[in-house]
Amino acid sequence: MTPFPRYPLLIIIALLIHPHSLAGIPAEERPPGFDSLTWNSPGLSSLGSMPLGNGDIALNVWVAESGDILFYLSKTDAWSENGRLLKLGKVRLSLLPGLLGQGGKFRQTLNLREGWIEIRTGEGGNTVVCRIWV
């Protein structure tokens, strides 16, 4: 059995700490990229998902190899009898053609200030943009 990868955990910790560490600094004085995190390749599994939430409902969002958008759905008060926070369901959004079938570039951006994830694929007239928020 392989050990749990530390990279996704570091991203989650950075997302939890990062917005609060510079919250009092005016927007024009913040470092570039402060308000967003961008990936140039799909996560392909829940281990490579982006977290998104509103303080009560949360998602873990990723794009599968088929081009489908998948996410786990959770809620802050969904605890098991053992005190474990549970995922309430897994949702699959299938698009025809799939997002990755467009060819060209892939970009998935988590906007921390506005609270949404944007998935952008393709180029030129074949660009597809999906925005997800909770």
Image (spheres, rainbow, N blue to C red):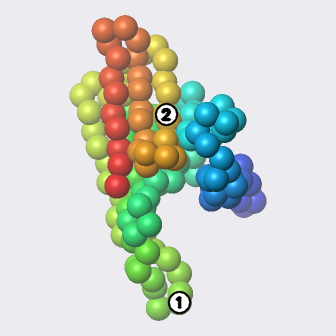
Label 2 sits on a secondary structure element that is: strand
Q: Is residue 107 above or below residue 34?
A: above
Mark 1 vs 2, N-terminal side = 1
Q: Position of residue 99 (x, y in %)?
A: 36, 28
Q: Residue at x 53, y 87 (%)?
A: 83
Q: Is residue 11 visible?
A: no
Reading the image, the residue beneath label 1 is: 82
Q: Nearer the viewer, mark 1 or mark 2?
A: 2
Label 1 sits on a secondary structure element that is: loop
* Few, some or many residues within 10 Å of mark 1 (<14, 14–19, 20+): few
Q: Residue at x 41, y 35 (%)?
A: 118
Q: Position of residue 13 (x, y in %)?
A: 68, 58
Closest to the observer, 30 or 42: 30
User: In what quadrant of the picture does the N terminus appear?
Assistant: bottom right
Kindly indicate whether the residue at mark 2 contacts the one at mark 1 (C-beta within 8 angstroms): no
Q: Position of residue 108 (x, y in %)?
A: 49, 34
Quarter of the rendering containing residue 124: top left
Residue 93 tag number: none
105 with respect to 31 (left or right)? left
Q: Amino acid at mark 1?
A: Asn
Q: Amino acid at mark 2?
A: Gln
* Few, some or many residues within 10 Å of mark 2 (<14, 14–19, 20+): many
Q: Position of residue 65 (x, y in %)?
A: 45, 34
Q: Residue at x 65, y 47 (%)?
A: 25
Reading the image, the residue beneath label 2 is: 108
